[in-house]
Image (spheres, rainbow, N blue to C red):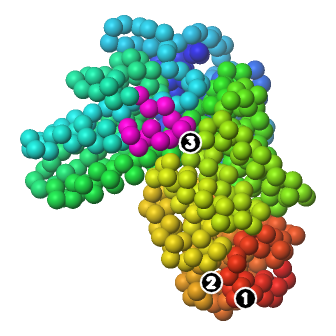
Amino acid sequence: MTWSFGDFRLDPERFQLSCRGERVRVEPQVLSLLIHLVRNRDHMVTKDDIIAAVWQGEAVSDASISSRIRSARRAVGDDGEKQAVIRTVHGRGFRFVPEVTTSSPARASSEGFIPSASGHPGGRPSIAVLPFERLGMPPELTILGDAIPHEIIEALSRLRWLAVIARGSTFRFRQVADDLDLVSTALAARYVLSGVIESPGRTIAVTLELTDSISREIIWADRLASSVDGVGELRSRIVTHLVSALEAHIPFNEARIARLSDPARLDAWAIYHIGLGHLYRFTAADNALAKRCFEQAIMADPQLARAHVGLSFTSFLEAFLRLTPDPELSAREARRHAERGLELDPLDPFANFTMGRTYWLSDEPDIAADWLARATALNPNYAQGFYASAFTSMLIGKASVAFSALDTSLHLSPLDPLLYGIHGVRAQILIQQEDYEAAAGWADRAATTPGAHYLIAMIALVANGLAERHDQAARWRQTIRRLKPDATSADYFAAFPTRETKSRARIEKELRRHGF
């Protein structure tokens, strides 16, 4: 579906604005704003609506909204005086004014125009990994242009949420890799990963680009290099770096596009990705929204294992964070939904990870460890699996195992949505080892990381109190009371039932000293 108004054509699926056939260059947020205004042209759109649609509910200033409105007006030949396209309803919001006609899109290919074959939404995201373009490679190293993409395909095939086009199909496009229309159409690929490998002097460098085949946006790119002697380590680093990057960037892009799509046209996978976006904000309100999305995804497709696993995750958070008056019921629900997800897809690392975490809630860390080991065996690049393994090792006092798993998790996913937990577990182990100064430093980092909840602030309070940094501990006490006024030491030990008795006693004493 595309919208036309005046000389302009807006394609929300390709995420593109054009004027008289020429593409208009605009920032992604400005384009998201235009799409939202056109989609809601039958009524006024408030600033809160815009914040929810464009910034996904994050706090933004009025100046930021005004800046995007000005840019949107400029893109469609409007201004604050004329307001022929975007009209300000003073003190209330904005309206999209022109008459809009709707039509079905057509996509250009090397052989003319064909119907859109990979528009969003359309099921599980798919990716085509192309052979790398070789520049200045010595003959003995040219095989890397095929070998590294082959290793990437093998690694990505472990991701149950991503459909990976087989090597036999993607490598047929060696000579036409730069024809994105041809590649994405022939392979029905939602995303295309391309690369350039070169060897200037005694080094090897690989440049990677992940492209959204519909919008033609590059949604992620990076460059990695090493000496020729380190080519083996470079190959491994490329694969692990890429898998963790795709775990973050593709779901984020899928959720962004789904939010901008007609809700009536969303399929189960699109709804699931919207839920995933809410899930990783770790607030009571977002957890409730995520739960609703996963339930809707199951209604659309009862066999979608990941939607059941998502419900397990939301129930886990209800119990773990005490978001419900009946955490024991939520714990049982977390186990039940995880079991259903595993029935549908026993080889999904996310399902095994989620099942393992349900055993934290029943204080059975040894059983949790078995499920989490299975998750990382299914996907050796699964950062959250290693984090959860570290958490489990912390509970039973295996410090060296926990530190190793934390290092692996951080290496695989340095910007992980559970980063606050990675730092928080490290702080807890350091408390067990009575290294309070180091514990306070890591706990402060954990509690100031996006997504950190009140339990992480409790770790920071304890660590700073034991380090005799009393002013900082008092500040974390205020934060805890703001985030959860009724928080108690029982909440802390329900979430972190450590079996290391000496540190447990010190932690409880410190919490009680601060009124918990």
Question: Viewed as shown, does residue 133 lie left or right of 3?
Answer: left
Residue 490 is situated, as x and y percent measured from the top left of the image, at 83, 74
Q: Is residue 490 above or below residue 46?
A: below
Residue 158 is situated, as x and y percent measured from the top left of the image, at 47, 42
For label 1, the residue is 506
Residues tagged 3 and 1 counted as in contact (Cβ below 8 A): no
Residue situated in front as seen by the camera: 459 or 37 = 459
Q: Nearer the viewer, mark 3 or mark 1?
A: 3
Q: Amino acid at mark 2?
A: Ile
What label sits on residue 108 in the rendered view? none
Residues tagged 2 and 1 counted as in contact (Cβ below 8 A): yes
Counting residues from the N terminus, which is met first, the one under dot 2 or under dot 3? 3
Q: Is residue 347 above or below residue 444?
A: above
Q: Amino acid at mark 3?
A: Leu
The region drawn magenta spans 153-165
Callout 3: helix, strand or loop?
Answer: loop
For label 2, the residue is 431
Residue 44 is situated, as x and y percent measured from the top left of the image, at 76, 29
Task: Kindly identify the residue that appears in the image at 32 percent across and 53 percent down.
Answer: 236
Taking the image as drawn, is residue 79 in sight?
Answer: no
Q: Quadrant of residue 398?
A: bottom right
Q: Quadrant of the N terminus?
A: top right
Taking the image as drawn, is residue 433 in sight?
Answer: yes
Q: CA–CA distance between discs 2 and 3?
A: 36 Å
Q: CA–CA distance between discs 3 and 1?
A: 41 Å
For label 3, the residue is 347
* Membership of 158 in magenta stretch: yes
